[in-house]
Structures are given as C-alpha cells and as structure tokens.
Image (cartoon, helix red, strand yellow):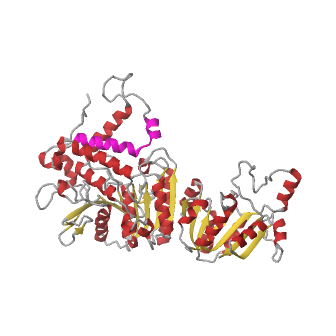
C-alpha cells in the first residue's frame, strides 16, 4: 500500500472556517478598498482575527502578532478545527513574555489565508463562487496593509509591538519599513528580508505537487467537490523537512522502523520518519486550503525588502525610531542566521536600535514555535525594556 | 573578549568620561554591565556589540540593544558619526587589527573611550625579567597559548598609535594595582611603569 489512508473532512467542513469562521470578522466594504501590489483593487474584503487582553485607555498597549505560512489567528486559544492549543501559547498568555494581563494582543488571519480572512476559498461576490485562482496574487506588503486597516478599525495609532516568526517575521519587517511610525518595537524571529533562491525552489516543489494532483481541477476543486489531498500532503511533507534539522531528525527518528522488526521490501512506511511525514501531510490537509497554500508561498517568494529600495536594505529602515529585536537559530537552514545578520547590519547602518540574538538549538526553523527558554528570556527582556521606554507601567 | 571580573574598576572611570544623554556604542560589551551602568547613571542611548553569544543573550535579557558581532569585521556596517562615544573596554588587546579598530571607532563616534591593561606595568616587566616567562596574573590569568589577548601593548605603545592615526588624546587616566587613579602631570613613562590599566578619551 502506498496510498494515504486519510480520514476525510469534506470540502464543506474544510471551507467552513474560510467562509464562516469561529473568529470575529471585520468587513471592509466598498468605502474601504485595498489597492494590492498587483494593481488590483480588492473590495469588499474581510479580516478575521483573535484578540486577548484589554486595550488600555490611550490605546498604547497593543501587540500585533503576525502568523507564519501555515499559521492562523488562533495564537493562544484552542483551535476550532484541530482542537489543539494555540500555536504560540508558550510565548503569549497570562504571565508569559507577551503577557496578556498587560498587553492587548491582536492576531489576524492574513489576507489570502483560509481561516476567515479573504482568500482563494472565500466567495467572490462577483460570481457567488469561491475565488480560487481569480483572486489577485497577494504580497507580504498587502497582508500588512490589510492588518493596518484592522488596527485602524480598533482606533490604534501606534502598535506597541509587532511580533512574528518566519513569514510572520517578514510582515514584522514590512510593518517596520512601510509603517515605521506605527511600530514602537519590532520582534522578527527566524526570518529574512527576502526569500532565498533555495526557499523559492522548495516552495515551487510544493506548488507543483498541489497542481499536479488531478483533484486540484485547475484550482476549482471547491466547486467540483474534490480536494487535492495527495498534492497538498506531499507539499507539506517536503516543506516540513525544511522546518527541521538533520540532527533533530536523526535524534528523534534515527533509522528506526515503524511498528515492525524488519523492512518489508516494499514501499510502505517502514521507517518512523516516513510515517511521521505522512501524518504531517495528512493532518495538514484537514485544516488548510490548497489554493491558500499556493498564495501564501507566492507571497513569501515575492518578498524582497531591499529591492523596493534600490537594493539598499538599510534604506528600508532609514530614520526608523523603532526598537528591533532580531532572533535566529543556529540550526535553521531555511532562514539561517546569515539572513538575520544581514537585517541587523542594515539596521545598524540605518542607525536604528537593534538587538540580535542567535539561539543555540538543533531544532531547526521550527524552534521559534517550541519551548526555547533562551528565546523567551531574550524576548521577555526586550519587551520589558521597550515597555518601560514606552511608559507602560507594570500592572 | 572582556575580562570577567565582577566589578571592573575601569567602568567608573569610563562612566565619568561620558556626558549624560549621549549616544553610546559599547564594542565588546560582555554581559552588558557597563551599558546598564551608563543607562542607569547617565541616561545614555546605549547600544552594544559582543562576540560571545552568551554575553549577547544576557545583555538582551537585561533589556539592552546588543547584537552579536566582531569588532574586527562588523564595525564597517555602522554609519559615520552615528554615536557620541564609542567605547572599547578591555577589548583592544583581543582584536586582530587594533589600529584598524581604533580608526573605525573614531569614524563611528565623535569620541572614543579605550581602556586596556598596560603590559608595561612593572609587575609584567618584573615577571618577564625574573621568570623569563609570559606573565600570568590575577587580572590576566591566561597562558600564552590559550589567551584571547593577542595584541598586548603598553601605554607608550598606545600613545604612539594614537599619533599614527591622528587621534587627539583628550583625557587619559591610569589606574594602579589598587584601582586608584595615578596623579596627573606625571610623564607617560611613569604611568607606563605604575599604571596597571589605562583609560583614554580620544577624539578625531
């Protein structure tokens, strides 16, 4: 047997969160259009979000969390589809480094996402059918523009902090660059100011896997009642390898066999690592929209902050008053420390205030989502010091 | 590479040379002790660069703006005159190219504050003369083969280098073995013999 024996959430159930999410939603109607980098004007559109804590009287204690490629707005609450804890409960919550007793924490599903914000699985008001590939390509800057409109909706002039890892970190850098005055402090973790050629290559493999699945139906799978399950699974399996490290994989799985004493001389999942990856692939399909995966990966590929400033990254941060904290991990080969160092050097050259820590770990790119005490202690110190500077008194 | 003593006598001298509210870059800031002192007592806008990851992480956890970097290779990323003071405390002797580093300090900062152990101190001279071996002292506890301090100099050597790069000595302080300032108006040669450490305030 080489096929995936997956439990199947029906396309209806899967698209439920895309069209009718558990999260609150802000509708931006005809009076509030969004001009995308592609030149297309998106209107109407909507943004789904989660919030935690209380916004103070002068609205100075808001922290925006930006989620990663396959993340969502459910930072610190049980996920409505998977039933799992919030993806960043290690960092965000009462008494945590991002303390919800102290800060108003906001996280929105990115534009192009599939958990309630306008994305390819949303209904196109012009046709009454899902957008599929009729939605314009979305960029990181577009995601940030939409977030800025959500922040406006809350009447917040300046965010105390914008925090994110990986694709979330790209949004943090974009915020600090193009909405500099609205960001008091920025925490960019395991990220870079551009997507490298190798990263684009991995994303292309993923996209081709999705599009090669006959069930993809040129993107119209929702209308046709199918789902490119195998394609998206393979995309996730390949991507998942890039989130780990060789050392961590070997430590966790080695060459161990899965529920058997000997290899089977076949193509079943003999090795634990195979079984693990297949599980990762299948469970991903249950919660993520395949077209959304195409849009998210494309947004990351197009990101190149220096290119918007004639190749000089420092110019992206010229005159910035934002305090920056840049975090990288020694074993992250997707966004290696050199990418973070490039950002830190550019911030130095721009005369910005920057902290840059590299955390020693063998857990690869995914370390930013895991229990990494040194990362927590660095972010905690950074946030506390920034809060003092912002005049936010400890309750 | 900073020396790891709990209370560094040169810190108070350095702090006394910094004007309140100044923009300060501490190159080789260790765990951030001096930067924290300067922020608390002089309300400076402080930044740091530190080679060791442990030092960087400790500094950032203290709430300081510190990045991991190397004095020899990373100062070039800083813009001209971005700081009022650039501090190099007990780090000069550990750099690969001290002359280049000193030149960079005075490009980045209006002024530079440099503290270093004086290899011309009489104990060093006596140790070498009597024992015929590289001195190992309480303050400089490394053997010659494992020391990070690859470019020791004396006060006289340092003064020569400031002349070579065209830097002006605005203030100089020598500290004896008890951490006390050696009186003013002494010739360099006297300081060179009795100063265990020196702190220089330089300008372009």
> What's the magenta bit mostly, secondary-structure-wise?
helix
Identify which residue, A75 or B185, lies in the foreground.
Answer: B185
Question: Is A151 left or right of B22, judged from the image as shown?
Answer: left
Q: Is residue A351 above or below residue A368?
A: below
Identify which residue, A195 or A114, lies in the foreground.
Answer: A195
- Rendering coords of residue A28 (x, y %): 21, 67
Question: Is A291 left or right of B167, judged from the image as shown?
Answer: left
Residue B166 image-quadrant placement: bottom right
Query: Which residue sits furthest front?
Result: B164
Identify the residue at horizontal 30%, vertical 28% (top origin). A268
Q: Is residue A239 located in the magenta-colored stretch of the structure?
A: yes
Identify the residue at horizontal 21%, vertical 39% (top origin). A8
Identify which residue, A225 or A47, lies in the foreground.
Answer: A225
**Start and end of the magenta stretch?**
A229-252
Identify the residue at horizontal 19%, vertical 51% (top origin). A16
Question: Where the C terminus of chain B falls, by quadrant?
Answer: bottom right
């Amino acid at each position: 047997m080489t096929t995936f024996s997956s439990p199947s959430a029906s396309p209806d159930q899967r698209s439920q969160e895309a069209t009718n999410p558990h999260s609150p939603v802000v509708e931006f109607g005809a009076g509030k259009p969004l001009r995308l980098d592609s030149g297309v004007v998106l209107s109407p559109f909507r943004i789904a979000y989660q919030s935690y804590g209380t916004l103070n009287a002068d609205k100075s204690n808001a922290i925006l969390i930006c989620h990663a490629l396959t993340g969502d707005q459910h930072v610190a609450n049980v996920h409505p589809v998977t039933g799992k804890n919030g993806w960043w409960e290690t960092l965000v919550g009462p008494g945590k480094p991002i303390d919800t007793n102290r800060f108003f924490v906001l996280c929105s599903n990115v534009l192009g996402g599939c958990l309630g914000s306008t994305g390819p699985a949303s209904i196109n008001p012009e046709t009454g059918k899902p957008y599929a590939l009729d939605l314009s390509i979305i960029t990181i800057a577009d995601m940030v523009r939409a977030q800025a409109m959500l922040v406006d909706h809350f009447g917040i002039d300046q965010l105390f902090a914008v925090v994110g890892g990986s694709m979330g970190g790209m949004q943090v850098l974009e915020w600090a660059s193009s909405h500099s005055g609205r960001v008091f402090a920025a925490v960019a973790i395991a990220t870079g100011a551009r997507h490298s050629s190798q990263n684009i290559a991995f994303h292309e493999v993923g996209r081709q896997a999705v599009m090669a699945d006959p069930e993809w139906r040129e993107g119209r799978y929702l209308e046709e009642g199918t789902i490119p399950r195998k394609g998206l699974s393979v995309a996730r399996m390949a991507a998942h390898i890039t989130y780990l490290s060789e050392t961590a994989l070997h430590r966790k799985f080695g060459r161990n066999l899965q529920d058997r004493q000997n290899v089977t001389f076949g193509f079943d999942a003999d090795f634990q690592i195979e079984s693990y990856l297949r599980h990762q692939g299948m469970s991903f399909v249950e919660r993520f929209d395949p077209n959304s995966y195409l849009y998210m990966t494309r947004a990351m590929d197009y990101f190149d902050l220096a290119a918007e400033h004639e190749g000089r990254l420092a110019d992206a941060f010229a005159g910035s008053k934002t305090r920056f904290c840049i975090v990288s991990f020694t074993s992250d080969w997707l966004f290696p420390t050199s990418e973070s160092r490039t950002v830190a050097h550019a911030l130095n050259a721009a005369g910005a205030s920057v902290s840059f820590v590299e955390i020693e770990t063998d857990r690869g790119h995914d370390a930013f989502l895991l229990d990494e005490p040194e990362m927590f202690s660095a972010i905690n110190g950074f946030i506390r010091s920034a809060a003092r500077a912002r005049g936010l008194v400890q309750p | 590479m900073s020396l790891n003593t709990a209370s560094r006598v040169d810190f108070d001298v350095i702090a006394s040379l910094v004007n309140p509210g100044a923009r300060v870059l501490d190159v080789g800031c260790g765990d951030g002790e001096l930067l924290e002192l300067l922020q608390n007592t002089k309300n400076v806008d402080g930044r740091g660069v530190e080679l060791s990851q442990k030092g960087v992480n400790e500094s950032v956890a203290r709430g300081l703006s510190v990045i991991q970097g190397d004095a020899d290779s990373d100062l070039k990323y800083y813009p001209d005159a971005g700081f009022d003071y650039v501090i190099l405390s007990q780090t000069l002797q550990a750099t690969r190219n001290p002359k280049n580093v000193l030149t960079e300090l005075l490009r980045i900062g209006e002024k530079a504050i440099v503290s270093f152990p004086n290899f011309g101190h009489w104990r060093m001279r006596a140790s070498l003369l009597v024992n015929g071996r590289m001195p190992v002292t309480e303050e400089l506890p490394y053997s010659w083969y494992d020391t990070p301090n690859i470019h020791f100099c004396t006060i006289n050597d340092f003064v020569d280098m400031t002349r070579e790069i065209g830097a002006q000595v605005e203030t100089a302080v020598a500290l004896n073995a008890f951490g006390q300032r050696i009186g003013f108006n002494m010739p360099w040669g006297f300081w060179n013999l009795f100063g265990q450490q020196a702190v220089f305030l330089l300008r372009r």
